[in-house]
Amino acid sequence: MKARPASPKHGLAAGEAGRPVRADWTIDQDWEHYTAQEHALWKTLFERQARLVRGRACREFEAGLRDLPIDADRIPDFRRLSDVLARRTGWQVVAVPGLVPDEVFFDHLAHRRFPAGQFIRRPDQLDYLEEPDVFHDVFGHVPMLMHPVLADFVQAYGQGGLRAQRLGVLHHLARVYWYTVEFGLISQEGGLRIYGSGIISSHAESLFALDHPSPHRVRFDLERVMRTRYRIDDFQEIYFVLHDLDELLDLARIDFAPVYERVRRLPEIEPGELGAEDEVLARGTGAYAARAGRS
Ligand code: HBI
Ligand code: FE
């Protein structure tokens, strides 16, 4: 891990033996106890990112953000977010101390509860951290959950996660989530737009994903994506592009079992690798990855 967040200062994450207090790993957001410094850090992140993603994020993100009680002044209160979200798509936001075990994560999603990091990153982690904090989860994910298609797709991922685990193919399914919900691009009127939360909540990657010549931008294809490894410690070397968010609705409905059967026999694909069957929208130079010592 490149950077670990400080453990939450309040809303105690773990019992004395280091186990979570509740079986579902939720904690109280304890909104009243955020410090002025923590709210100020939110403001810094929010203002910078709200300005940057205008015209870069897809219109569904813009609409979701506009309709939610999320603003620059304070870290959002999950109870108020849940009130609005529940009325729109039936989702709620619950607080967790950070990454939770896969089964716990899937169970929340399957029940339309989005586990959001309670803590906010440290000031020296403005640009990057690997563990999801309140800015990544609330600014990045919650506006997209206001959209009915994304709302259904993320629930289907939770339902499919436990099954994929039993089948021993979770890594294939996790790549679908990674290259859509976290790092997905979509083409809309003005060109490429971002819908992936990992990009939307990152200042540097919001620029890199759309404008940098290094990464490939390739048309989304389910089996191709299931075979593609990803990196969690740096910008992506490839982004997959949807024509329409409705494509995710089809994915939420189909049975992945036969797809897993095909994919598990096929070779894995490295993040920077292109194949003959790819519909390449923009071939990347790979220059960034090469400079970072990969190639
Ligand atoms: N926990 N809080 C949190 N957020 C995530 O995005 C998350 C997680 N646990 C597991 C996980 N993601 C992934 O590894 C699964 O999607 C496979
Ligand atoms: Fe995320």
Image (spheres, helix red, strand yellow):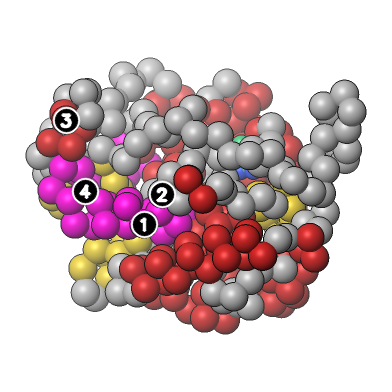
Q: Nearer the viewer, residue 38 or 104?
A: 38
Q: Viewer-nearest of labels 2 and 3?
A: 2
Q: Is residue 236 visible?
A: yes
Task: Tell which tag, 4 or 2, sits nearer the viewer.
Answer: 2
Q: Cβ–Cβ below 8 Å for labels 1 and 2?
A: yes
Residue holding disc 4: 217
In 3D space, how far apart are the residues under numbered discs 2 and 3 (Cα atoms)? 19 Å
Mark drawn on residue 291: 3
The residue under label 2 is: 127
Magenta segment boundaries in residue numbering: 196-224
Q: Is residue 220 above or below residue 286?
A: below
Query: On the rendered structure, is 106 left or right of 194?
Result: right
Q: Give me the residue at 48% from left, 45% from top.
A: 125
> Label 4 is placed on what type of residue?
Arg
Figure quadrant, ligand 1: top right
Q: Name which residue type carries label 3.
A: Arg
